[in-house]
Image (spheres, helix red, strand yellow):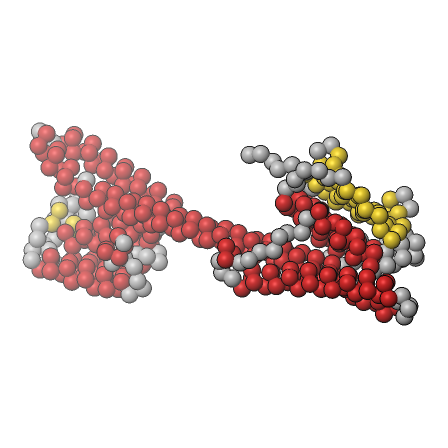
Amino acid sequence: MIERLLGWAGPRVPLLQAIVLFGLGVAVLAAGMPVFAGIGQHVLAPSHPLRLVTLAILCGAELLRQRAPEIALTVALVVAGVELTYGVSIATVLVFADLLFAATVFGSRRTNQVVVWGTGAVVLGLVVVSVASAHDIKDVVVTLLQVCSLPLIPVWWGMNVRHHREAAAAERARADQLARIAELDRDAAVRAERSRMARDLHDVIAGHLSAIAIQSSAALSTVDGDRAATRRVLESVRENSVRSLNEMRAMIHLLHEADESTVERLAPARLRDLALLVESARAAGLDVDACSDVEGELPAAVDLSAYRIVQEALTNVVKHAPGARASVSVGRADGALVVEVVNERTAVGAEPALDGGRGLLNMRERAQAVGGVLVAGPHERVWRVRAELPAEEELS
């Protein structure tokens, strides 16, 4: 705002300012305003042609006030030094003060320090000379007001403007950093949400739909006369189809609705539905034994994660080790919920590859999301999936 009021911004401003200062200087010289006495014996009149030459040189240096303020100030110092020999005009003082201001504002940090310390030394020297040569205190005050204010005011003003510029630049940089951090946070939130949605979709597709495909194959291979087995398989297929459709419908509604509070949610799957998973696996032809001795309430996230881990583990057994015998056990140990799914590796290549598919990765992510751990792999001639999850809510 200060720069805008002063007119220091814009590529054409230095040229316009040089023209304005030259015109103002010509008017001052034409008016015959007083000239400050120099170190020489002869003082040139304000209307002397040499005054116009020095004024033109100073105004030409105005064109470099932003791009090269050090060069512009050097030219001004040389011209002022020359004018000291025959008297310094008010026009020269005006242009010199503006170039001193520009060097303080637009110069490098080193240039700014040199200008500030140099101005301080000059002012201090003027004070010493004034005190030593004055006859009384009034002469000292008048001399200081006339002489010391000429270099002091533009430098002080320029320091204030530079301070505001640097403060504004620091705030802009800080705002850019905050905006970047906010963008990174949004990206991280989007990635986390996409990862969560991918896990949920995988659970629905790999859990229910894979069971449907396997059970349909079992139904097609059932002996024609075994109506009871066929009916049991078809009932399991229908149950998995209905549950899959309900979960998919709930997820689609959640994605379409802007306000999550208006979405009708399904009750999340819990370990109390473990029997349904076991029956579905048995309908697909898997021999499964299940044992669960969990009593009391579990945290909802832990309960859901345990259910999904068992679901994925049984699906992997049905897909990768058909005809194998499996066992599921759920219980508490040392304050943790322990979920274990074990199957015999009766077929060559029956064990699921650790780097294949998303199943094992999703199980690990679900366990880690609630603060637990999951281990999957060969163990004493069997394939075991074991998860240890926190069984109690953490109190804050």
Q: Residue at x 25, y 46 (%)?
A: 157
Where is residue 135? Give x, y as percent. 9, 30
Q: Residue at x 67, y 38 (%)?
A: 296
* Viewer-nearest residue: 278 or 188: 278
385 horizontally vs 365: left or right = right
* Viewer-nearest residue: 24 or 246: 246
Number of numbered discs overlaid on the protein picture:
0
Where is residue 72? Give x, y as percent. 30, 55
143 horizontally vs 213: left or right = left
Residue 172 seen:
yes
Residue 350 seen:
no
Locate residue 266: give its quadrant: bottom right
Q: Quadrant of the C terminus?
A: top right
Q: Is residue 243 above or below residue 110?
A: below
85 horizontally vs 64: left or right = left
Q: Residue at x 12, y 33 (%)?
A: 140
Where is residue 10? Give x, y as percent. 30, 62
Where is residue 71? Give x, y as percent. 33, 54
Locate residue 219: give its quadrant: bottom right
Q: Quadrant of the N terminus?
A: bottom left
* Viewer-nearest residue: 160 or 252: 252
* Viewer-nearest residue: 102 or 61: 102
